[in-house]
Image (cartoon, grey):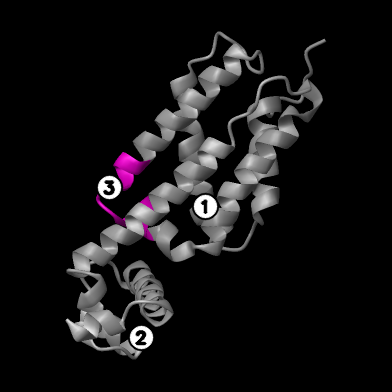
């Protein structure tokens, strides 16, 4: 147990973070089955026993990455709920800020986003839970008078998850759009539509 004792503290924490970062890169690039613990530790310049101090298995480190992605994403969605009493004029700006934060997280963490949103078998469950959380936000926001009452909020939430999922791949990860610009596009689409006519 002496080795375990020596690994506590900042050096141990650095080793764990290093392993997580390299594992995220390997999983994102090669997929779960092609990723090997031996490759992760070699790239980290650590030993396999060191790996097993922190993670029981390849599955355990993969699951930690998925859990980390899920927790961060849901935290951003929770923070994006509009507070009561906003001026209507600032509505679009507030929604844009919330979406920009989520897209910035995706861009800054592309590997765990690929794992948690696309690669893991739990990705569908993550998206269902995400749609539920967005629906809860929208329900409260409708009660506060921000949106129409005759809209199926689950449909809106599922649509938003689909938009986020697709545009992350086609616009964010390709570098075509920055998070703020992409958030702007989505807010304009959802709040103002694409019709060239205006309701008088």
Q: Which of the 4 quarters of the picture holds residue 3?
A: bottom left
- In the image, residue 12 sits, relative to residue 136, either above or below, namely below
- In the image, residue 110 sits, relative to residue 18, either above or below, namely above
Q: Name the residue under label 2.
A: 44
- In the image, residue 124 sits, relative to residue 194, either above or below, namely below
Label 1: element kind: helix
Q: Is residue 35 visible?
A: no
Asked whether 77 or 31 is in front, the reply is: 77
Mark carried by residue 122: 3
Q: Position of residue 176 (x, y in %)?
A: 63, 59
Q: Which residue is drawn at 61% across and 48% down?
A: 101
Q: Magenta-highlighted stretch: main secondary structure?
A: helix
Whether 154 is among the magenta residues is: no
Label 2: element kind: helix
Name the quarter where the C terminus is drawn: top right
Q: Give the range drawn in magenta.
A: 115-126
Q: Mark 1 and mark 2: span between their CA atoms?
A: 29 Å
Q: Mark 1 points at which residue?
A: 168
Name the quarter where the N terminus is drawn: bottom left
Asked whether 25 or 137 is in front, the reply is: 137
Sequence-wise first label, 1 or 3: 3
Sequence-wise first label, 3 or 2: 2
Question: Do the CB atoms of the residues marked 1 and 2 lie less than 8 Å apart?
Answer: no
Asked whether 119 or 58 is in front, the reply is: 58
Sequence-wise first label, 1 or 2: 2
Mark 1 or 2, closer to the camera:
2
Q: Where is residue 185 in the image (x, y as percent from the top left)?
A: 68, 41
């Amino acid at each position: 147990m002496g080795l375990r004792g020596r690994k506590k503290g900042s050096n141990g924490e650095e080793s764990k973070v290093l392993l997580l970062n390299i594992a995220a890169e390997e999983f994102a690039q090669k997929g779960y089955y092609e990723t090997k613990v031996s490759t992760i530790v070699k790239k980290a310049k650590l030993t396999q026993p060191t790996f097993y101090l922190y993670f029981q298995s390849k599955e355990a480190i993969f699951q930690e990455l998925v859990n980390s992605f899920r927790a961060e994403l849901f935290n951003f969605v929770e923070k994006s709920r509009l507070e009561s009493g906003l001026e209507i004029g600032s509505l679009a700006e507030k929604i844009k800020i919330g979406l920009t934060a989520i897209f910035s997280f995706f861009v800054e963490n592309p590997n765990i986003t690929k794992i948690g949103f696309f690669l893991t078998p739990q990705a569908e469950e993550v998206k269902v839970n995400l749609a539920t959380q967005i629906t809860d936000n929208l329900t409260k926001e409708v009660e506060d008078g921000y949106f129409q009452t005759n809209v199926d909020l689950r449909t809106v939430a599922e649509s938003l998850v689909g938009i986020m999922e697709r545009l992350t791949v086609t616009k964010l990860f390709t570098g075509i759009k920055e998070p703020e610009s992409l958030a702007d596009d989505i807010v304009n689409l959802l709040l103002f539509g694409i019709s060239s006519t205006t309701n008088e």
